[in-house]
Amino acid sequence: MRNCIKVFFLLMATMLWVSAKAATMADINMPYGVTPVSQDIYRLHMAAFYVCCGIGLVVFSVLFFSLFKYRKSKGAKASLFHEHLGVEIIWTIIPTVILIALAIPATIVLKKIHNTDESKLTIKVVGYQWRWRYEYLDQGISFFSNLATPQAQIDNTSPKNPWYLLEVDNPVVVPVNTKIKLLVTSDDVIHAWWVPTLGVKQDGIPGFLNENWFYATEIGTYRGQCGELCGVNHAFMPIVVKVVSKEDFDKWVKAYQTGAKNHTATLGHEDEPKVTEPATQAAKIAEVVALGKAAYQKNCAMCHQDGGEGIKGTFPTLVGSTKLLDERTAITTVLNGVPGTAMQAYASVLDDKTVAAVLTYTRQAWGNGALLKAQNKLPLVQSETITQAKQA
């Protein structure tokens, strides 16, 4: 019997040690984070974890001791009783004390999470299916942030990089040691702006503005994702926050504002091909198609696929699509979306030139150009046409 008890307590001690060891492993535990709130959340989490471990150790110790000590093979007989006032008081008081002991620090942390006073920088975050839009309200900066993982990696036709599905074209840039206020909402369905290392997870609900904040104490790049199931491409809404020095942030703001005034790349998309004024119509179409292809792969390929074939029963094919080949219908669909479906309105997402380029590319690609030629139509859609359609 003594050997059994020794083995049991050794097993319990081993389980407790393994649990404590696992809790310190960053890859399977909550991150400690780089913000005061994230660190408070981590400490609260660990306190609750160790309380649970202690409760489990006590409960299972009593359980297994009873099984060994009073097993039937030793002739033990169960006692018959209905209640015990002392035991009932004890098992009511102890859980109450534990809950109060955990509720007090939890309430303090919750108060910190929702206290956005004395913020130095305010960013409005808007969720779309499936991208984020950021507006620096005091700096006059606004841009969309899209998934930057190449479609080839998503299709498993090329090796995946370390930041697969966690990379974007335009990251959020904020200064270190500065309280950043977030105003989070959504344009369509419920999204959630979630960056674990910053200790932020805030739902974006259409028609509502929810507040949150973070204060990063270390320069670096921190990544997250949409934390609310928002549709078929929920997994393709990454978040990247670059925390830089205050001097570098000021430089970034000035460079961005200067670029916007000079009408350079739309909202920071400097890597995309630009539409110029080539000498010939053929050259112009080729250059617009290059811009349209880049924009299509960034904004449309997730749903309609890289080859335009769509997903049967979910997203229609663009190959030989009568709606796409009809210029007016195609423009209306892209600008206004399709109510009741995952096809969102792109009028406020893409500028007129990019919309025209995307339509030109899709009307030229996958054999659609030949169909238009047979109808004596050109695939080229003018940006002026898009502007006129918005104003109509």
Image (cartoon, helix red, strand yellow):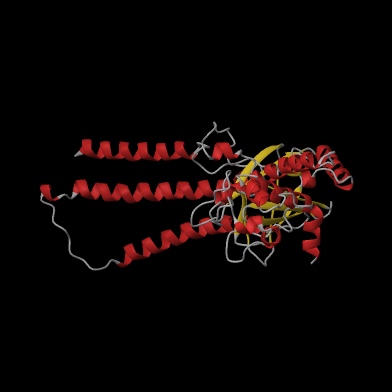
- In the picture, measured across the screen, residue 295 lies left or right of residue 141, that is left
Give percent across and percent down for residue 282.
Answer: 77, 40
| Quadrant (top left, top right, bottom left, bottom right) of the C terminus | bottom right
Question: Residue 326 location in percent, x, y?
Answer: 67, 58
Image location of residue 200, percent across then percent down? 63, 51
Asked if residue 246 is positioned above or below residue 336 in the image, the reply reads: above
Question: Residue at 72% across / 50% down in the picture?
Answer: 378
Specify whether residue 53 is in view: yes
Q: Is 59 on the left or on the right of 305, as rendered?
A: left
Q: For the N terminus, which image quadrant?
A: top left
User: x, y (%) of residue 98?
Assistant: 47, 57
> Is 377 left or right of 11, judged from the image as shown?
right
**Which of the pair 24/166 is nearer the observer?**
166
Q: Of residues 299 and 72, which is closer to you in this image? A: 299
Quarter occupied by residue 328: bottom right
Residue at 83% in and 54% down: 138
Is residue 195 visible to us here?
no
User: Which residue is located at x 71 percent, y 45 percent?
Assistant: 292
Q: Is residue 43 left or right of residue 18?
A: right
Residue closest to the eye, 275 or 210: 275
Q: Nearer the viewer, residue 89 or 292?
A: 292
